[in-house]
Image (cartoon, coloured by chain):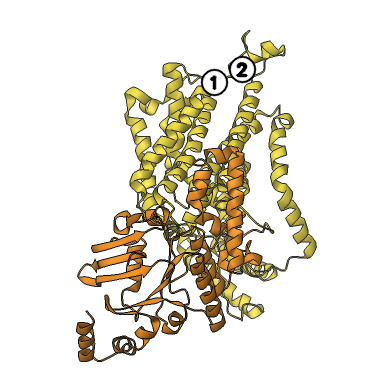
Chain colours: A orange, B yellow
Amino acid sequence: MSDDILAVDRLMMRFGGIVAVNSLSFTAERRKITALIGPNGAGKTTVFNCITGFYRPSGGAIRLTHDDGRNIQLERLGDFRISKYAKVARTFQNIRLFPGMTALENLMVAQHNALMRASGLTFLGLIGVPSWREAEQRAIDLARTWLDRVGLLPRADDAAGNLPYGDQRRLEIARAMCTEPALLCLDEPAAGLNARESGGLNELLLSIREDGTSILLIEHDMSVVMEISDHVVVMDYGVKIAEGTPQAVRDDPKVIAAYLGADEEEAIAVMESGT
Amino acid sequence: MSATSARPSPAPSTSGAAFIFKKSLISAGVALVLFSLMIGVRTEAGPQGGLIYWTRFDDLAALVATVFGGSIIVELLRQWWGPVDTERMVPKPVQAAMSFVGRWLAPALLIFAFLIPVIFYDQRYILDLSILVLTYVMLGWGLNVVVGLAGLLDLGYVAFYAVGAYSYALLATNFGLSFWVCLPLAGILAAFWGVLLGFPVLRLRGDYLAIVTLAFGEIIRLVIINWQSLTGGPNGVSGIPRPTMFGIPLTPGDDGLAARLGIEFSPTHRIVFLFYLILAMALLTNWVTIRLRRLPIGRAWEALREDEVACRALGINVTTTKLTAFATGAMFGGLAGAFFATRQGFISPESFTFQESALVLAIVVLGGMGSQLGVALAAVTMIGGFELFRGLDQYRMLVFGMAMVLLMIWRPRGLIGHRAPTVFLERNQAISSDLVKEGHG
């Protein structure tokens, strides 16, 4: 319990009369890959949007604990501050790169806050002081490192919009990593990838975990999740229906019912026993 | 009129005489329907006040025939030119020549600009026109920061131009401050107004933002007209001091520049000085913009234009980023305004109508959003071209409008449509305009 990076406590999210997330509680362990799975429309992305500040939760608490023991209540921060101060980075289900900028530029934009400080809020950078030049070179080096890790170094100077789909997915992860996050939230990173690409993605995510970044992963493709996640949380209709190791979750009848689709009575029975 | 022939359909049968004939026939048919009443029948109030009319079928026939012939020519040209935005069938030497021109155009233009007062020393008209063109180049470059880089559609840019002009005019006439003191003040005041405008409109996007900025431009103008005690209302401010060359006036008196240098006084000296002043100011704008693009703030502007949601996810404060774009653009507008005031010696609200905003925006869009060279070329084309067609009298607007329509058909993303990356590892290759977003405010 003490080494959780993220603790979501009774999270509620209402849109008008619709309850998208209903009193959801789960934790994500430090330096582990936690997967949030569930059928379409289960509320996974809504949870993500709450954690990364795109939605303000209707109720509940989201606590992030940094390595130094500093606690941050994410539901109070909101918007860009979550990435800037709480060091939570995210990717999107439908890739959101800057298509008209090169791969390298995409990674440079990700280092905006560090570079803004280094450029003395632009003024020192405008006159080109040496410390700014050094900082810029360091930023380029960091970007180069990540381009290399995702295998995009040869395409560094190509427009992001020109890259193939799988490359765009990996570039988005590299961009999120360039913000040097403590927690990386990935929204269906394997969507649309073929078997070989998704194998490469698994390796990349495992290596990110080895470097000490915790990962929270949304995926509704069970087979991908099983291979890399340490802990799985299963959602359906906005509530948690199961949680545990991938093996335990896979054999859970409630999860199987949710995925395969159960008839109404059965579903109600599953929901009641789940909560 | 040419709605049917404006866009080639990508269907396979877009060649062959039958296709061209059919297409031209349709165009001619549309022209016949349109012009039969507009040209074919002429009505006028008769001497008794009744309506008299007569027919001009020969004119109508000539016009329809022109449309028919014209659309055949356009179609042939299009097939020779190939589809827009793809590998064109342009011969290799021509391509090489074009890339050579592209590389040396900017330096050549710069050298030419420096030499204009030397070449055209005796031609006051050309010098005045060059100053006007350079003023619009500077305004275009300033607005380019807001529209081209940050992707925020600003229809009220003239407001900052006005703020700068009135700042200098009022500070100079009321407090006797010199041009060189007022110039930065005008820039700062305009930037301040830029931030002030930015705050309420930040949550708006796209069309809504455009409307609010348009309103802001009008508000500034109306305040200037109605605040008679301060601005002189519609009468404007006159007797604005001319600029001095760092304290040395350009006058025929004993302390003037000519007397000090021991040369004969000529009024052209002041014009030449003004020319180099606006050239320096425009180049400063350009230099700052180019530098800003390579700094995190400039990259954040472009990222904002590309995808605002992704910017937020990366920890970029969208609010302050937009505000800095507004403020930077406004500052350059204000500086240009101060120059305008000192050049004219007289300003009135009439100089700051919406038409000016539209003109500057047209320069930015025509030039290719975000491209510095493109904006400069567009300013030369728009302002210079407008003067060039002066001999055509009432057809001037027609020719000008047609030239712009043609340009937008052939180069829909402006004269220079591609984007140059701000940083590269190995290859500095331009990015096609198809990928670059226009921004949604």
- Could you give the CA–CA distance between mark 2 and mark 1, rounded to whole angstroms? 8 Å
Quarter where residue B87 is shown = bottom right
Circle number at residue B58: none
Chain identity of mark 2: B
Provide the residue designation for mark 2: B250
Query: In the picture provided, is B139 more to the left or to the right than B326?
Result: right
Provide the residue designation for mark 1: B242
Residue A234: percent from left, percent from top? 33, 79
| Residue farthest to the top, as pictured | B254
Query: In the picture provided, is A97 more to the left or to the right than B256?
Result: left
Specify the amino acid type for callout 2: Leu
Q: Secondary structure at mark 2?
A: loop
**Neighbour tally class for label 2: few under 14, some 14-19, many 20 plus, Cα within 10 Å:** many
Asked whether residue B45 appears in the rendered view, the answer is: no
Specify the amino acid type for callout 1: Arg
Residue pictured at 42% horizontal, 38% vertical? B159
Is residue A131 placed above or below A51 in the rendered structure? above
